[in-house]
Amino acid sequence: REMIGNLNGLRIARDAGLLPGFFPAVVALGIEEGLGRITAPSVAVAAAQVSAVVQELADEADAAALAPGASLECDPYHAIAANLPLNTYKNKAPLAGAIISAKRIVGPAAPGEVCHIRIGTGDKFRYWEGQSLGVIPPGVNAKTGKPNAVRLYSIASTRYGDDAKGSSVSLCVRRALYWDADTGAHDPAKKGVCSNFLCDSSPGDEVHLTGPTGKVMLMPEHEPATDLIMLATGTGIA
């Protein structure tokens, strides 16, 4: 054990395959990785450098654990158009997702209600920043007797989703209500069908998705220096 009291001893222990017997596996691995990068003149400084390498390895492991299971990048990175998913799911064959959360994101005194809706999709729903998706609310149209039509919403999350795993999509939805000035109350017959369905949803509720759609609002990745002028109404700022 005395041989590991200095930097040269650590190298000898490494070459002899003794490090796993002296240290926990992750520490031994960190030392082995770090020895190739260490130029410290003393054991104290070397130990600090080894510690930094171990932390670096731990960070890399954490990042790998968060990495999406499927590739969400283009090669080259700006080749969006050739890899853009479009209308993967259609009205007659939508994707059945599940609500992860629906949370109000404006204060109690705000004029209206806006909710952040997270929807779990697994790795089946691929999209790009700048695209939209469709939500088919349950039920039938009271006027036509036919199933409710699809509503389009701008996607508020990056292609990685809020969980950074590529397994969800998020929306910012303003609850659509109609205030009847004559009665001095909201008219429930004229409230937004889909926005209220989403804002009132609970974790685990099924939601049918279509899309993604849109190919004109994508970021010009091939020209990073491009100036962007961003305008939005309603919740489009998401």
Image: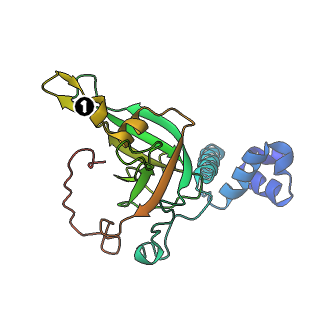
Kindly identify which residue carries mark 1: 112
Query: With 60 as the anchor, is 4 left or right in this view?
Result: right
The answer to whether 51 is drawn above or below residue 12 in the figure is above
Q: Position of residue 107 (x, y in %)?
A: 28, 26
30 vs 151, nearest the viewer: 151
Quarter of the figure that contains the N terminus: top right
Does 39 appear above or below 82?
Answer: above
Q: Residue at x 23, y 33 (%)?
A: 178
Neighbor class of circle 1 (other Cα within 10 Å; few <14, some 14-19, many 20+) is few
Say which quarter of the image contains residue 140. top left
Asked which secondary structure carries label 1, the reply is loop
Image location of residue 132, percent across then percent down: 38, 58
Foreground residue among 103 and 43: 103
Residue displayed at 44% across by 61% down: 212
Residue under the point 20% across and 66% down: 227
- Measuring from the top left, give residue 123's x and y in whole percent: 59, 57
Q: How many marks?
A: 1
Residue 238 vs residue 79, the one in the foreground: 238
Q: Is residue 1 visible?
A: no
Residue at image point 86% right, 52% down: 18
Q: Position of residue 136 (x, y in %)?
A: 45, 50
Q: Amino acid at mark 1?
A: Gly
53 is higher (above) or lower (below) than 110: below
**Residue nearest the viewer, comparing 180 with 165:** 180
